[in-house]
Amino acid sequence: MSIGEQMLAVAEAAKQASRDMAILSSATKNQLLLNMATALEDHSARICAENERDLCVARENNMAAAMLDRLTLTPERVVAMADGLREVALLPDPVGEISGMWLRPNGIKVGRQRIPLGVIGIIYESRPNVTADAAGLCLKSGNAVILRGGSEAIHSNRAIGAILQQPLESMGLPQAALQVITTSDREAVAELLQLDEQIDLIIPRGGEGLIRYVANNSRIPVIKHYKGVCHTYVDVAADLRMAEQICLNAKVQRPGVCNAMETLLVHRDVATTFLPQIVSAMRQSGVEMRGCEAARKIVKDLVPATEEDWAAEYLELILAVRVVADYEQARQHIETYSSLHTEVIVTNDYRLSQRFLREINSSVVMVNASSRFSDGNQLGLGAEIGISTSKLHSFGPMGLEDLTTRKFIVLGDGQIRE
Amino acid sequence: MSIGEQMLAVAEAAKQASRDMAILSSATKNQLLLNMATALEDHSARICAENERDLCVARENNMAAAMLDRLTLTPERVVAMADGLREVALLPDPVGEISGMWLRPNGIKVGRQRIPLGVIGIIYESRPNVTADAAGLCLKSGNAVILRGGSEAIHSNRAIGAILQQPLESMGLPQAALQVITTSDREAVAELLQLDEQIDLIIPRGGEGLIRYVANNSRIPVIKHYKGVCHTYVDVAADLRMAEQICLNAKVQRPGVCNAMETLLVHRDVATTFLPQIVSAMRQSGVEMRGCEAARKIVKDLVPATEEDWAAEYLELILAVRVVADYEQARQHIETYSSLHTEVIVTNDYRLSQRFLREINSSVVMVNASSRFSDGNQLGLGAEIGISTSKLHSFGPMGLEDLTTRKFIVLGDGQIRE
């Protein structure tokens, strides 16, 4: 079989399996996830041994330390994967929920009911734990899932996939509900992305290069975010001690993730007080500060910020700072440079807080809280399958509900249309 | 300017305008639509005169009568367009709605609030009334809209677009919130479909050819449906008089639309009673009946149905009939041939009705009602911008809410992440 035929067979089998998965009871799906968790722990040694094969190749190829760490599985990390599945088992099942039902003048009752999307494709890079995490969320929401991880994790993913399929088999469920693509053929992804008759959604997880490749080559809808250029605006009416805590947390607590702050906007009437304070605090945490001209008049030794800095997603201990004349200028700055991810205002001005919430249409807008809360778990979705910064279907962190859609149901009594 | 530069300028202006439109009050948007309705009626003569220019060209080109009818505007049809805008003005505004807010253990409050999508592109064929209808829905939901109608309606659309822009101008709103593309350059659509940084959603309205072209060439998300192969299953426990009424209505009342029935499935235990009855009734309404082998044993002179008939969207007075052994076979037939549009069961068996609602995952599933109710107005959405038979974002008839998305809002009190 050509790689195209192989992928078509995988996708057809997934579509077939998705019909069975769609009508499973919540109890069955939860038991499946619990059995998968047990299976992972029972085969921890095998997973770690297969992972070691990937690590050997990676070391030979001089993989960078940070990537090596992402690729590494330990017995503790296998337990963490298993516990992740157990947590998802405990979440409410979105499938079947009927949100509102109404009566039409002719007597038909109309409602909308949640159903699974069908078949979900996950394209990801080196973290093998994604295999279990994504599978758990897709199966809990009644979907079939096709997982394609990076070639550097191929032995780990193959082992995890085979182990996760065992509970499907022992429970009499279709094994094709969870398929891991482990061919080394690089064309596999390109072929999968053409199968819009079989696959309902593609979620790429990884660097911007991977995501752009998937978005540009897919006939299937893709939910994605390229980057997070998150802003915090410290207003004239801010509690400056609170502002300092929020900014420090947003920049320093975990700088390498998409919900970390990248640009700080400060109202000019508090800049002379707040800027020296925050620059000192940030520098104590090792942050390089880059500032606009007005900021550099207040703190002379700031690195000059260029146009590129306003658009940058540093993902490291660098922060761009701009002094703005007022809220309106802050709003315009955000509008110009926003990645639609997360924006924060720190203020005690009630009216302005409401205006910020209304006028800023990024996927997450916050008053007086750290942008680091922009995360499915932190926002209370229970788990996160990804984040969307485009507006169709989902906008912001995505949980189980985002892996479903709604159909209309109509209860009649013989009505016909006049 | 090249056509690409022209379309980029249009889309950039729309994006800029969309920011103003997003924060308008419901009262302002409603007044805008009412003013647009008045403007259409005030300029009815001009619209009809421009329409006559399109009709002249169409007659010279020997346009088919049905298409000519779709292209034609009369004073009555202009009033109908105006009334359509007034109806949309009366609908509830989805923008700003907060659906649930919850408290996290750390004290932050998290909610989801509806916001407009941003910029919506409508690509359509010969009906010039779409210009006003689609504009009304997009503007009411706080979006900017770019309309590209068929070249055969170019004078009509140009006139309607100019007239609809007047109320925007007189109310001090950005005219770029409503732009009609009236260049005859066929590349205009191809260029628009590349502008995924500016345009958030494309809705094609027209024949399958147009829709496939748009879907295959767009970098922007597209909401679409190709066809409606709607099934009605008459169960053994059906009230056969009700079944006859529902089937007749579903096939005959307006056969040329996507929610008309195309295939009738009949349980074999009622086939000897029901088939002669429905064939006779259908034939009296001029319907050509095509049947499976079992059906032709009961009604000998049916046209034999082929594999192609099961997949056909006739859009005319032809109906395919299949006798099935039981519900399970009906379900499998629907699963195989469904276009995911609308499926109906006629039965008085409560348990089976619930099973049908659960197991059939088309966008609209009905018990004991005509498939002709599968329409935004009939289902109570107030108006319809289109219908989606793919599952992302929307599934089924789409109303105002489908032209919006939700952002997360977070109200904190200084919380930072541990």
Image (spheres, coloured by chain):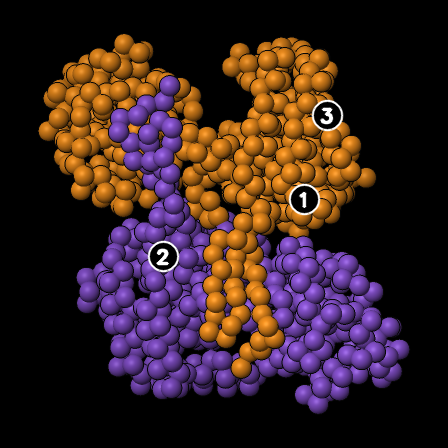
Chain colours: A purple, B orange
Q: Tag 3's secondary structure?
A: helix
Three-letter amino acid code at the position of disc 1: Leu
Image coordinates of residue B309 in percent, x first then y, are 31, 27
| Quadrant that contains the N terminus of chain A | bottom left
- Please tell me whether mark 1 or mark 3 is closer to you in this view: 1
In the drawing, what numbered circle is on residue B24?
1
Mark 2, other Cα within 10 Å: few <14 / some 14–19 / many ≥20 = many
Mark 1, other Cα within 10 Å: few <14 / some 14–19 / many ≥20 = some
The chain under label 1 reads B
Spatial CA span between label 1 and label 3: 21 Å
Three-letter amino acid code at the position of disc 2: Pro
Q: Please check whether the numbered discs 1 and 3 fall on a single chain.
A: yes
Instruction: Identify the image quadrant of residue A162.
Output: bottom left
Mark 3, other Cα within 10 Å: few <14 / some 14–19 / many ≥20 = many
Q: Please check whether the numbered discs 2 and 1 fall on a single chain.
A: no
Instruction: Look at 84% across and 75% down and name the residue there.
Output: A295
* Residue indicated by mark 3: B163
Three-letter amino acid code at the position of disc 3: Ile
Instruction: Identify the image quadrant of residue A104.
Output: top left
The first of marks 1 and 3 along the sequence is 1
Spatial CA span between label 3 and label 2: 46 Å
| Quadrant that contains the C terminus of chain A | top left
* Residue indicated by mark 2: A94
Specify whether residue A72 is in view. yes
